[in-house]
Amino acid sequence: MSATRSPAGIRLENLTLTHGRHPAVHHVSGRFAPGSLTAVVGPNGAGKTTLLRALAGLHKPESGRIAHEGTARIALLPQLAALDRAFPIACRDVVMQGLWPRLGAFRGVPQAERDRAARALAAVGLSGFEDRPVGSLSAGQTQRLLFARLLVQDADILLLDEPFNAVDAKTSADLLRLVREWHGEGRTVIAVLHDLDLVARDFPETLLIARDAIAWGPTGQALSAANRLKARMMAEAWADEAEHCHIAA
């Protein structure tokens, strides 16, 4: 992985995201600065995962836009539950999926890239797991495997959806070290998180969202008691059947 990065940031301009025209993220504007390390936090149903999918190009905005600053490769770490661990695939093949954007899904993989996959597995503590089936891994080992796939993607912008959820403390600590390394290399890292103590300790910037952006900026300010109360009150007011989103002309 390269130690020098081209600056890569993302701007949100009055962004609205919906599911069947029902609001998920509502008129959000702001900027993930190049090289920033940002936590995205908020109550359940706040639109955090939908926002990450939109940043990855997997969810089309209802209105507004997502503007990329600079030319950047983007990689998404989905929630652990999104991986079908019953599918018969070896760890090496999961890691090499990270090469598809550059090599294509149906081309032969050069030995140099196979060696990169092996080094990525070693970097996350899974040396020798190349031929192990994914279904034989624990939750913590599976998350390490997904981080190895991120390593070979060598992306400029990394989108992490609950990267430390449902894994043991040692795995969380090891993976957090990787996140710090990525940040130190100048990559832009955006992570959906629930552990506010971890956010306060390790993430300089925070977007607190409850469909609307409640606060976005330095973590200590964004996670003030007043902002957290506002987010909770907004969540408690959500109806099970929200109205369609109407965009002002």
Image: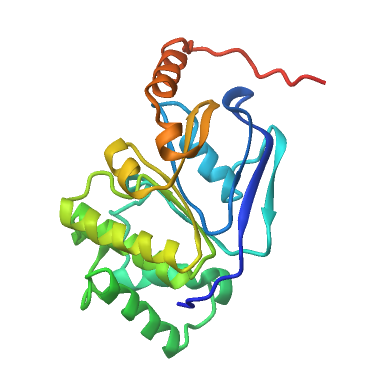
Q: Which residue occupies 54% across, 39% down?
A: 51
| Residue 37 sits above or below residue 187 on the image | above
In percent of width and height, residue 145 lies at 30, 64
* Count of numbered marks: 0
Q: Nearer the viewer, residue 18 or 155?
A: 155
Q: Which residue occupies 43% across, 89% down?
A: 112
Q: In this rendering, would 86 be left or right of 216?
A: left
Q: In this rendering, would 209 be left or right of 245?
A: left
Q: Residue furthest right?
A: 249
Q: Nearer the viewer, residue 156 or 110?
A: 156
Instruction: Identify the coloring.
Output: rainbow
In percent of width and height, residue 137 lies at 20, 60
Q: In this rendering, would 124 be left or right of 183?
A: left
In percent of width and height, residue 107 lies at 54, 79
On-image quarter of the C terminus: top right
| Residue 70 sits above or below residue 212 on the image | below
| Residue 224 sits above or below residue 52 on the image | above
Q: In this rendering, would 54 be left or right of 134?
A: right
On-image quarter of the N terminus: bottom left
